[in-house]
Amino acid sequence: MIMMSKTTAPQILMISMLFINLMSSFLGSSFAVGEPKCKEAERQALLQLKEDMYGGDGWDDGLPSWAKEEEKKECCEWVGIRCDSNSGHVTTLDLSPSTFEDSHSTFSSVGNITSLLAHLPYLNYLDLSGAGFHDKSSMPNVIDALSKLTKLRYLNLSYTTLSGEIPPKIGNLSSLQFLDLSGNDGLRLKDLQNWLSHLSSLQLLDLSHTNMSLAHDWIHVVNNLPHLAYLNLSGSSLQNHHVVSPSFLSHINSSKILSVLDLSRNSLSPLIFQWLFNHSHTLIQLDLHDCQLKTSFPKSFEKMATLSYLDLSQNQLEGSIPTSFGSENNALTYLDLSQNRLEGCIPISLGNNMTSLEYLNLSNNTLEGEIPKSIWKICTLKVLRANDNALSGQLQLAKSSRQCVHFSLEYLDLRRNQIMGSLPNITMYSSLVELLLRSNQLNGNVSETLGQLSQLKILDVSRNFFKGAMSVTHFSKLFNLHRLDLSSNSQLALNNIPSDWVPPFQLKFFISGLAFWVPTSQIGFVHKSIMSKLISLIPKFQILFPIGFGIYHLIYIT
């Protein structure tokens, strides 16, 4: 099933354009107009199909527009159905979950539905995604029936509990432009040359979460699909030995338009990079996360100027990020290098050249040194995660917005590093929703500008060395705050808090390790009226316990 869970706006737009171009060819002239044109034989086949799904007294619950009554006789107007506006033949059958109002498609027998589809020979669009079969869904039986629908250009059988091997007959569907068999983990794919090579019109192919452990020829076959723009093989049990020799990879004729490639959650060899770089001028989205890739960071990535989305997380990439990386990658909006073995400093080029970045994740490596000033000046950056490294130096936040109309940063996670210095003026980042600075070496006073972050929901500055007093100014506009952690800052105090102060926030979600030292004088004790106000904002299933002189610790009870 086509997934876009982590894509940013440019990727969604690009993938959407692929779908729109493809879908317009299916649906452009399919609306029924004028006199009813529904073919009686096809209408009866559809009614029988519905009865197979909803047999018994409630057979019309799921598709109320599919009915026998005279006023609903026009099947071309039924939900999930489209017809050719000239001939009246049914061309589209969509039984995907989005079609159904209060239920989903479940068929009593795979044999029933495939026999009924034989009465719809003009179908060019068939979506059975998410359909369940009460009997064991044998792929050979399904394909045996579908292979007669030679006009099909769109076929979606994702998450249909299909199992077994794909028979060569599927190659008869030579007009297919879209094929999705994803989410059928009992489906075994091998000898792709026998069928996939015959589908030369394919533009989008999704075989993710199937079993391709014996598909040794996948690269060779994929390279001979000249129109392929989208390929998803995520979690399909590809093995290291599936990647062919470097000499072969250097002489192959790859698809000239492959734009989106997802090979994540497989076991791949670093040799895969040699094949990928044959697509350096076309790839826009590349996902290789969790592929067990053990190698140094490939320098050739800097030549992939069209890349907008790159995910290399959860691998074993070693060494430093090349200083030249980013020099030609100014189209990147999404970059995830987290959970690797990268070391050294963050290249300045990441900020100087990748000026369109929206998401940057460098967490769980051993990166060191100071975060370059150029990173903080990326106007479009919404998410910066660099937690669990060995970063040091100070936070060189932007002090003006001369380069940006508005800084977009919403999520900043720098937990568990060695960052020093004070928390500087942060008003340039007024969109911050989460600010996570736990377990660093930050010290000095906490800037009062913190209180201007009206969108802030989570604030964690625990386990640092902050000192001095925090006043109502630090919280003045934190209207959305629901998680606050100031613990383990032994010299940090709440001071000069009026006894009638009403906090602007609602601590209604979760507070972890909240420690307050609230002196009424320079030595002081807990000011009961202040603590009672804070406690009143805490859910009843959370309990505040004293843990020392003037210090309270909040325990979350589940």
Image (spheres, grey):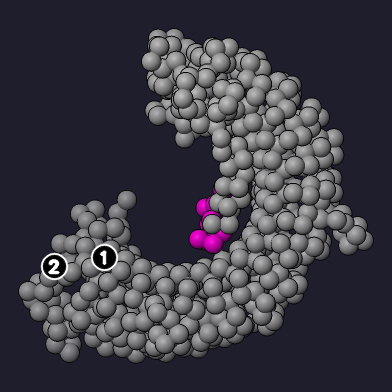
- Residue picked out by circle 2: 533
Of residues 244 and 381, which is closer to you in this image?
Answer: 381
What's under tag 2, amino acid-wise?
Lys
Q: Is 269 displayed left or right of 68 in the figure?
A: right
The image shows residue 155 at horizontal and vertical percentages of: 64, 34
Q: Mark 1: few, some, or many residues within 10 Å (few <14, many ≥20)?
A: some
Q: Quadrant of residue 429?
A: bottom left
The image shows residue 221 at horizontal and vertical percentages of: 82, 45
Q: In this rendering, does residue 65 appear at all? A: yes
Q: Is 3 included in the stretch rendered in magenta?
A: yes
What's under tag 1, amino acid-wise?
Asn
Q: Mark 2: few, some, or many residues within 10 Å (few <14, many ≥20)?
A: some
Count of marks, rendered view? 2
Give the magenta part as a residue range: 1-12
The image shows residue 157 at horizontal and vertical percentages of: 62, 32
- Work out whether mark 1 precedes mark 2 in sequence or the reverse, and give the earlier one: 1
In the rendered image, the quadrant that contains the N terminus is: top right
Q: Is 248 displayed left or right of 449 in the figure?
A: right
Q: Residue at x 47, y 35 (%)?
A: 98
Of residues 195 and 416, which is closer to you in this image?
Answer: 195
Could you say whether the residue bearing mark 2 is in a helix, strand or loop? Answer: helix
- Residue picked out by circle 1: 480
